[in-house]
Image (cartoon, rainbow, N blue to C red):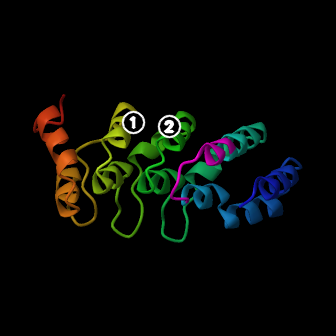
């Protein structure tokens, strides 16, 4: 989605027209942007501008909490795609998303970090209050998921740095 289209939609929202906001929500531009595989400076800039514009019309929280057809919110999608900077931006605005499950298996953002073996995202989520002992709908926790996805460095990091009670 181009920056021009986002500007156009957000411009309409300033009038607080519910129909325009509903249309904006259907397009889920933030989740769409987070689906990009490469966290480029251009992508970060576009997301940052979107955040600022949504803040000006007091709608950022609603957009961040919105879920797509897979029942994933923007933070889930960011972590799935290893977008560290955008994940930090989302958590700065809506920290409660750190412990929100999503998707058909009810994975938490910390689970997606484990599946990707991303120590950096794990640390971002953990420092924002992620519960490390959560299990998904299949009863799998971060250790199960990291092992299942063969993320050995991630497993070593968790085992070396956290005890059974998830304390450092």
Q: Quadrant of residue 68?
A: bottom right
Question: Can residue 96 be found in the magenta stretch?
Answer: no
Residue marked by disc 2:
88
Against 123, is 72 above or below?
Answer: below
Residue range corresponding to the magenta coloring: 36-45
Position of residue 13 in the picture relative to residue 41 (left or right):
right
SS for callout 1: helix
Separation (CA) of disc 2 from disc 1: 7 Å
Against 44, is 21 above or below?
Answer: below
Q: Nearer the viewer, residue 40 or 115?
A: 40
Q: Nearer the viewer, residue 65 or 50?
A: 50
Position of residue 160 in the picture relative to residue 56 (left or right):
left
Q: Quadrant of the N terminus?
A: bottom right
Against 64, is 160 above or below?
Answer: above
- The residue at the point 63 percent across, 54 percent down is 30
SS for callout 2: helix
Dot placed on the residue nearer the N-terminal end, 2 or 1:
2
- The residue at the point 33 percent across, 67 percent down is 105
Label 2, residues with CA under 10 Å away: few <14, some 14-19, many ≥20: some
Mark 2 and mark 1 residues within 8 Å of each other at the beta carbon: yes
Q: Nearer the viewer, residue 147 or 66?
A: 147
Please state the horizontal and vertical placement of residue 159, each as a whole percent of the image: 12, 40
- Counting the numbered discs, the total is 2
- The residue at the point 12 percent across, 35 percent down is 160
Residue marked by disc 1:
124
- The residue at the point 36 percent across, 31 percent down is 127
Please state the horizontal and vertical placement of residue 132, each as a whole percent of the image: 25, 42
């Amino acid at each position: 989605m181009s920056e021009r289209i986002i500007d156009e939609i957000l411009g309409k929202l300033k009038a607080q027209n519910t129909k325009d906001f509903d249309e904006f929500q259907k397009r889920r531009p933030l989740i769409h942007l987070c689906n990009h595989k490469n966290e480029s400076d251009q992508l970060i800039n576009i997301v940052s501008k979107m955040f600022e514009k949504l803040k000006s019309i007091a709608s950022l929280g609603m957009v961040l909490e919105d879920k797509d057809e897979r029942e994933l919110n923007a933070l889930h999608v960011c972590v799935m795609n290893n977008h560290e900077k955008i994940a930090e931006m989302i958590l700065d605005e809506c920290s409660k998303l750190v412990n929100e499950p999503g998707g058909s298996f009810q994975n938490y953002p910390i689970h997606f970090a484990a599946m990707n073996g991303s120590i950096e995202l794990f640390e971002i989520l953990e420092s924002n209050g992620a519960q490390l002992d959560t299990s998904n709908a299949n009863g799998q926790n971060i250790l199960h998921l990291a092992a299942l996805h063969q993320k050995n460095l991630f497993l070593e990091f968790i085992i070396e740095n956290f005890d059974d009670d998830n304390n450092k």
